Image: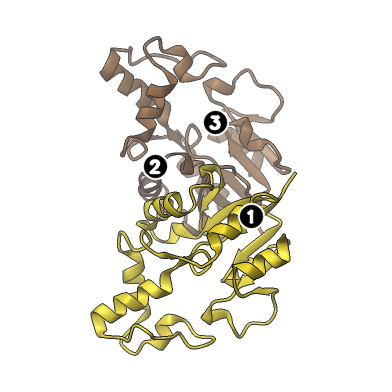
Chain colours: A yellow, B brown
Amino acid sequence: MMKRIAIDMDEVIADPIKKFIEMFHNEYGTPLDFKVETGKELHECLPEASFEKVYEYLNQKGFFRDLEVIEGSQDAIRKLQTKYDVYIVSAASEFRNSFTDKYDWLAEHFPFISWENIIFCGKKIVDVDIMIDDRIKNFVGFDGRPLLFSSPHNLLLTQYERVDNWQQVLDKLM
Amino acid sequence: MMKRIAIDMDEVIADPIKKFIEMFHNEYGTPLDFKVETGKELHECLPEASFEKVYEYLNQKGFFRDLEVIEGSQDAIRKLQTKYDVYIVSAASEFRNSFTDKYDWLAEHFPFISWENIIFCGKKIVDVDIMIDDRIKNFVGFDGRPLLFSSPHNLLLTQYERVDNWQQVLDKLM
């Protein structure tokens, strides 16, 4: 049986940060080349922003529908599928309006992933061998191989095996 | 740590069969007291029906929003939560339009289940100790304790521990 991989969506195959910055630009004039500081969350870096504002954006219908694809993720996942049983595992249950947007986004950009391999959840209690995620909370209690996908907020963490991009994922797993 | 239970939705806590029969009644005059034959699927029992017609209904927006709650499931799950970490695990990914309907249905009838414990998936590759489901395909590869929740289509199967109703689930697990 093929080993199973669980792959997160946001900040791993989809880019919500870029969209947030565009929305903050439109609402507050935040520069479009704004960078999230190392080790911080987006909402901690934007003076006008608040945790609530980020949640307001996340809850808007359509937010997750037109995110940019993270570079290299499509080709890499197609390659991984030749050797692994690949699942997309996203914590969509936090945001009622995100389900259909995420589903349609996957159908558009990752049509080679079957509905059987799409998991929208809260806590990621999946029975897989490898988990690629940018949030270490999802590794708690996971006894497989975690790969921490680099994102500004996690760059200071050292306790997990790290991948900075999709080429590094392929170098490690193929 | 509490043991985890995965609980299916359709034919376990929600009743799509009753709604199907009402829809067939409205479209074809099928009697409202129609019963699915033991060991058969609904679509095999209705002369006018076809597999495609059942799928057409399932794909309609709203189909899963107003299903009746299976008797005893709400009280039973509240009791199970005192001893177990309870997850709702539904194969919603097969039907694009079902996500929001199922989410809103759960919010209405099971408001005591957190978003963190809701999983909409395809293949049920969940890391749990007990799985309550009416479809034995979901038990394949599962190495915990499966409980087959009785539904007409599964009544002839004998290879799994069976529960006929929610009182029997409580008798076994509490």
Q: Residues within 10 Å of mark 2 (few under 14, many from 20)?
A: many
Q: Nearer the viewer, mark 3 or mark 2?
A: 2
- Seen at 32% across and 22% down, the residue is B22
Q: Which mark is residue A79?
A: 1
Q: Which mark is residue B165?
A: 3
- Residue A129 lies, in percent from the top left, at 71, 56
- Seen at 47% across and 53% down, the residue is B113
- Callout 1 secondary element: helix
- Callout 2 secondary element: helix
Residue A141 visible to an observer of this rendering: no
N-term mark: 3 or 2: 2
- For this orientation, the residue located farthest to the top is B47
Q: Residues within 10 Å of mark 1 (few under 14, many from 20)?
A: few
For mark 3, name the chain.
B
How far apart are the two marked residues, 1 and 2, measured between alpha carbons?
31 Å
C-beta proximity under 8 Å, tags 1 and 2: no
Image quarter where the C terminus of chain B lies is top right
In the image, is residue B28 above or below residue A57?
above
Depth check, front residue: B156 or A71: A71
C-beta proximity under 8 Å, tags 3 and 1: no
Asked which quadrant contains residue A16, the reply is bottom left
Residue type (three-letter) at the residue carrying disc 2: Ser
Residue type (three-letter) at the residue carrying disc 3: Asn
For mark 2, name the chain.
B
- Residue A59 lies, in percent from the top left, at 33, 64
- Seen at 25% across and 78% down, the residue is A26
